[in-house]
């Protein structure tokens, strides 16, 4: 069955493909515009479910660009116990559901296993077989990334910033990164001019050069830089034997 191309839910993106690849595109694209917390879907799992149920278009762009959820996540909100098990639901509200569907991952694993069975050297494969193997593992990575993002959404509010949680297979930690992007050329040019700096000194508006001029002119960096923060859940250790035994 041929799937109808689905548009990326990020405003003004223009990317379209089958839903699973659109979800992978959002997962792999940096910037606040592609942050699930700012979109109208509660993670890639919710997006794929909406596409399967056919209600993707009905949601429209109502949730796009909403900074509220993103601010709560970036702020590292948790309960007052400080034990990293924060509750992100308000009093009287039902806990938010974080359902996942790992079956596509299992199916992708079987395909990848079948295609790679007996393969010891990739150079021995014919080009079409190598292409199939690439596709199999590409789909596996995409499906696994979708479920991983769902798990990230469910756990991130339970982990305090710079905290590490130990499991049986390994540990995870939460950190925060900051991205700066220049505002419009007109805004940057005006800020430099008002600070007594010739805007032509940063004609290309290279971020590093602008940063130096901002420091030189004692300009508030928020005047010329848009700053966004995002949280990351990363793997910090792995019990290799646990995976080798399987």
Image (cartoon, grey):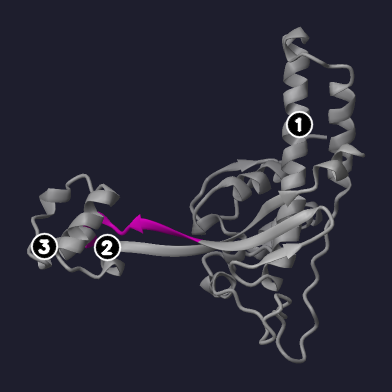
In reply to whether residue 215 is colored magenta, the answer given is: no
Q: Looking at the image, which residue is at 68% across and 52% down?
A: 235
Q: Is residue 207 above or below residue 166?
A: above
Identify residue for label 2: 224
Q: Earlier in the sequence, mark 2 or mark 3?
A: 3
Q: Earlier in the sequence, mark 1 or mark 2?
A: 1
* Contact check, label 2 and label 3, Cβ < 8 Å: no
Q: Nearer the viewer, residue 57 or 10?
A: 10
Identify residue for label 1: 137
Q: Position of residue 182 (x, y in %)?
A: 32, 56
Q: Position of residue 53 (x, y in %)?
A: 81, 56
Identify residue for label 3: 193
* Contact check, label 3 and label 1, Cβ < 8 Å: no
| Left or right of 214 in this view: 62 | right
**Label 2 SS:** helix
Q: Earlier in the sequence, mark 3 or mark 1?
A: 1
User: Which numbered circle lies on residue 46?
Assistant: none
Work out which quarter of the rendered image holds the N terminus and state it.
top right
Residue that protrudes farthest toward the bottom in the picture: 92
Q: Nearer the viewer, residue 16 or 128?
A: 128
- Residue 38 visible to the viewer: yes
Q: Nearer the viewer, residue 199 or 234?
A: 234
Chain part drawn in magenta: 177-187
Q: Looking at the image, which residue is at 77% across and 10% down?
A: 125
Q: Residues within 10 Å of mark 1 (few under 14, many from 20)?
A: some
In the picture, residue 81 is in which quadrant? bottom right
Q: How many marks?
A: 3
Q: Residues within 10 Å of mark 2 (few under 14, many from 20)?
A: many
Q: Position of residue 9 (x, y in %)?
A: 60, 55
């Amino acid at each position: 069955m041929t799937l109808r191309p689905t548009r990326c839910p990020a405003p003004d993106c223009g990317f379209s493909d089958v839903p699973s690849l659109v979800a992978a595109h959002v997962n792999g694209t940096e910037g606040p515009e592609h942050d699930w917390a700012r979109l109208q879907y509660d993670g890639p799992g919710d997006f794929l479910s909406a596409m399967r149920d056919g209600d993707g278009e009905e949601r429209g762009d109502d949730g796009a660009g909403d900074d509220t959820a993103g601010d709560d996540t970036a702020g590292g909100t948790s309960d007052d116990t400080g034990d990293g098990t924060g509750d992100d639901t308000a009093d009287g509200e039902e806990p938010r559901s974080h359902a996942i569907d790992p079956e596509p991952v299992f199916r992708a694993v079987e395909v990848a296993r079948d295609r790679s069975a007996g393969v010891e050297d990739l150079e021995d494969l014919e080009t079409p077989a190598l292409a199939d193997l690439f596709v199999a593992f590409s789909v596996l990575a995409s499906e696994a990334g979708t479920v991983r993002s769902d798990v990230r959404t469910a756990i991130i509010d339970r982990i305090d910033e710079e905290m590490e949680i130990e499991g049986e297979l390994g540990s995870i930690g939460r950190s925060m990164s900051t991205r700066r992007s220049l505002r419009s050329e007109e805004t940057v040019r005006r800020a430099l001019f008002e600070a007594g700096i010739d805007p032509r000194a940063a004609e290309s508006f290279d971020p590093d050069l602008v940063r130096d001029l901002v420091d030189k002119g004692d300009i508030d960096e928020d005047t010329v830089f848009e700053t966004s923060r995002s949280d990351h859940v990363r793997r910090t250790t792995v019990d290799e034997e646990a995976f080798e035994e399987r």
